[in-house]
Image: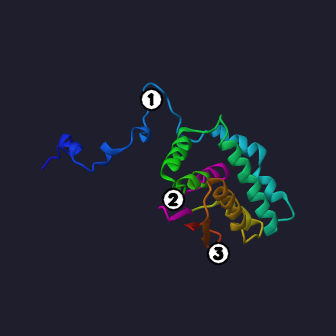
């Protein structure tokens, strides 16, 4: 049995007919939108914050890693939200968050993804769960974790926690963070963010 969309459109309760006119998101005909992360953003961030400098320091204490993570993320956020690098995706995520009042996980997730792509553009990773209550990010071959392991540092998650905490603050969300990682230095880890 085929659906008659004209009849369906007239049925009371059809959400597509009840969206308030001011809330409809439309694409302007003839306008090109940029949705992808600009490569120039990665170059700009890496120019100001070199990951190699992190590993040349003799002081790789947890406090140092926390400070470096916050410094990296504040630099990334400043650049990512600036006019040259802000893309259509960021605009739409923010607009929907304002309309719905729900900033988790999407606003937060944007910053998490930007951090991964800026620091480790060649790593394999995925969002394994994204709901309004939980966000899980799994890295399969974390080059950052492997570099930490080469230096004999087992608390690489301190750096990432600081990065993600700064992202949560910028996104205006609070989330409990958990991290599971393999102790065999395989580069497999998963961060879980639970909305509070």
* Structural crowding at the residue carrying mark 1, measured as other residues with C-alpha within 10 Å and reported as few (<14), some (14–19) or many (≥20): few
Q: Nearer the viewer, mark 1 or mark 2?
A: 1
Q: Is residue 25 left or right of residue 70?
A: left
Q: Position of residue 83 (x, y in %)?
A: 65, 35
Q: Is residue 28 left or right of residue 119?
A: left
Q: Does 95 sit above or below residue 67?
A: above
Q: How is the image coloured?
A: rainbow
Q: Verify CB contact (< 8 Å) between mark 3 and mark 2.
A: no
Q: Which residue is mark 3?
A: 183
Residue 121 counted in the magenta span: yes
Report the disc number at residue 28: 1
Report the disc number at residue 127: 2
Mark 2: secondary structure: strand
Q: Nearer the viewer, mark 3 or mark 2?
A: 2
Residue 55 counted in the magenta span: no
Q: Nearer the viewer, residue 81 or 54?
A: 81
Q: Position of residue 44 (x, y in %)?
A: 72, 40
Q: Earlier in the sequence, mark 1 or mark 2?
A: 1
Q: Earlier in the sequence, mark 3 or mark 2?
A: 2
* Range of residues picked out in magenta: 113-139
* Structural crowding at the residue carrying mark 2, measured as other residues with C-alpha within 10 Å and reported as few (<14), some (14–19) or many (≥20): some
| Residue at the outermost bottom position | 183
Residue in view at x 56 percent, y 43 percent? 90
């Amino acid at each position: 049995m085929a659906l008659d969309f004209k009849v369906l459109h007239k049925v009371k309760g059809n959400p597509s007919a009840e969206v308030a006119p001011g809330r409809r998101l439309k694409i302007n005909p003839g306008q090109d939108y940029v949705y992808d992360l600009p490569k120039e953003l990665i170059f700009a961030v890496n120019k100001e914050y070199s990951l190699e400098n992190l590993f040349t320091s003799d002081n790789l204490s947890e406090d140092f890693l926390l400070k470096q993570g916050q410094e990296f993320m504040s630099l990334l956020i400043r650049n990512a939200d600036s006019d040259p690098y802000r893309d259509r995706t960021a605009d739409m995520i923010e607009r929907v968050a304002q309309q719905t009042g729900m900033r988790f996980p999407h606003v937060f997730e944007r910053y998490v993804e930007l951090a991964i792509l800026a620091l480790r553009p060649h790593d394999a990773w995925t969002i394994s769960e994204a709901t309004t209550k939980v966000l899980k990010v799994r890295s399969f071959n974390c080059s950052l974790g492997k570099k930490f392991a080469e230096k004999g540092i087992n608390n690489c998650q301190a750096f990432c926690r600081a990065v993600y905490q700064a992202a949560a603050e910028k996104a205006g969300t609070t989330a409990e963070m958990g991290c599971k990682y393999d102790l065999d230095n395989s580069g497999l880890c998963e961060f879980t963010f639970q909305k509070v």
